[in-house]
Image (spheres, rainbow, N blue to C red):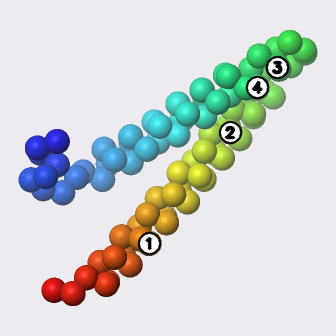
């Protein structure tokens, strides 16, 4: 944390962290909600992969919207600050 206060944060590390969060959150949601129900009946690997990719894409969209609105908020706050 001390290094973050001394200079700018590396964008690649932040982007990699967000991507890993999206992938793991999507996989966790898939495993806890859909995997049990899907394998109680007949399914195949293609359907499972498509479901998991859809969930990961949905979580990625949600994270993208949250980051976008946070950036808008920060830009608005910076414009209102008078130096």
Q: Are marks 3 and 4 in contact (CB under 8 Å)?
A: yes
Q: Residue at x 41, y 67 (%)?
A: 71
Q: Secondary structure at mark 1?
A: helix
Q: Residue at x 71, y 41 (%)?
A: 54
The residue indicated by pointer 4 is 34
Q: Quadrant of the C terminus?
A: bottom left
Q: Is residue 33 above or below residue 55?
A: above
Q: Real-space Cα distance between discs 3 and 1?
A: 40 Å
Chain-order first, disc 4 or disc 2: 4
Label 4 CA crowd tier, 10 Å (few <14, some 14–19, many 20+): some
Q: Secondary structure at mark 2?
A: helix
Q: Looking at the image, which residue sits at the far bottom?
A: 82
Percent x, y for residue 15? Answer: 39, 48
Residue 55, label in figure: 2
Q: Real-space Cα distance between discs 2 and 1?
A: 26 Å
- 46 displayed left or right of 21: right
Percent x, y for residue 18? Answer: 43, 44
Percent x, y for residue 33? Answer: 73, 26
Chain-order first, disc 3 or disc 1: 3
Q: Real-space Cα distance between discs 3 and 4?
A: 5 Å
Q: Secondary structure at mark 4?
A: helix
Q: Is residue 36 above or below residue 56?
A: above
The foreground one among 30 and 81 is 81
Q: Residue at x 44, y 72 (%)?
A: 72
The residue indicated by pointer 3 is 37
Tell which tag, 2 or 1, sits nearer the viewer: 1
Q: Secondary structure at mark 3?
A: helix
Residue 72, label in figure: 1
């Amino acid at each position: 944390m001390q290094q973050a206060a001394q200079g700018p944060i590396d964008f690649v590390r932040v982007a990699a962290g967000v991507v890993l969060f999206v992938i793991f959150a999507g996989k966790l949601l898939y495993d806890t909600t859909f995997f049990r129900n899907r394998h109680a009946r007949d399914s195949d690997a293609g359907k499972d992969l498509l479901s998991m990719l859809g969930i990961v894409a949905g979580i990625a969209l949600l994270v993208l919207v949250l980051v976008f609105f946070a950036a808008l908020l920060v830009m608005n706050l910076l414009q209102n600050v008078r130096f």
